[in-house]
């Protein structure tokens, strides 16, 4: 049971690391999300988003081996995933690539819930 949170954090880190390839250019962003950046401003924002996902992924992975950071990492993961899921629900009508991102974020949310519940279950044993 003590490995649940570290495994969850590594898996969620991997999920958050997937968009890092977007930093390489507009073509990679288009492949990831099925949209072409309509102008350099949107490209800049999307590529910077890739950097931020890389930063979050690195933190989640680092926190996996630092028990004192587990709670902060789970919280950061929840904020990332839940905010995207809430926005996707509010906005709706997204393309197939973004629908895949939504499905993967539901998986990430399930993992994060398991990671959040595991310590309480362990204490109850």
Image: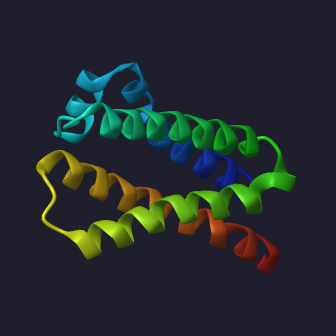
Specify whether 82 is left or right of 63.
left
Residue in view at x 37 percent, y 72 percent:
86
Q: Position of residue 15 (x, y in %)?
A: 45, 42
The image shows a total of numbered marks equal to: 0
Q: Position of residue 111 (x, y in %)?
A: 51, 59
Q: Residue furthest top?
A: 24
| Depicted 79 relative to depicted 40: above or below | below
Q: Residue furthest right?
A: 68
Q: Quadrant of residue 42?
A: top left
Q: Say which of 108 and 51 sits in front.
A: 51
Q: Residue furthest bottom?
A: 124
Q: Say which of 124 and 49 sits in front.
A: 49
Residue in view at x 37 percent, y 29 percent:
22
Q: Quadrant of the C terminus?
A: bottom right
Q: Quadrant of residue 93?
A: bottom left
Q: Say which of 60 and 86 sits in front.
A: 86
Colouring scheme applied when the structure was drawn: rainbow
Residue in view at x 27 percent, y 75 percent:
90
Q: Say which of 38 and 60 sits in front.
A: 38
| Depicted 71 relative to depicted 38: above or below | below
Specify whether 27 is left or right of 124.
left
Q: Quadrant of residue 32?
A: top left
Q: Position of residue 121 (x, y in %)?
A: 71, 75
Q: Position of residue 87 (x, y in %)?
A: 34, 69
Q: Quadrant of the N terminus?
A: bottom right
Specify whether 48 is left or right of 69.
left
Residue in view at x 69 percent, y 42 percent:
59
């Amino acid at each position: 049971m003590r490995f649940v949170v570290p495994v969850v954090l590594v898996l969620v880190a991997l999920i958050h690391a997937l968009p890092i390839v977007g930093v390489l250019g507009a073509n990679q962003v288009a492949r990831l999300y099925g949209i072409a950046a309509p102008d350099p401003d949107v490209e800049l924002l999307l590529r910077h988003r890739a950097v931020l996902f890389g930063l979050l992924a690195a933190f989640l992975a680092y926190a996996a081996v630092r028990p004192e950071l587990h709670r902060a990492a789970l919280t950061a993961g929840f904020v990332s995933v839940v905010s995207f899921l809430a926005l996707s629900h509010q906005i709706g009508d997204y393309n197939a690539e973004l629908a895949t991102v939504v499905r993967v974020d539901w998986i990430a949310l399930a993992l994060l819930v398991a990671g959040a519940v595991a310590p309480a279950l362990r204490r109850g044993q």
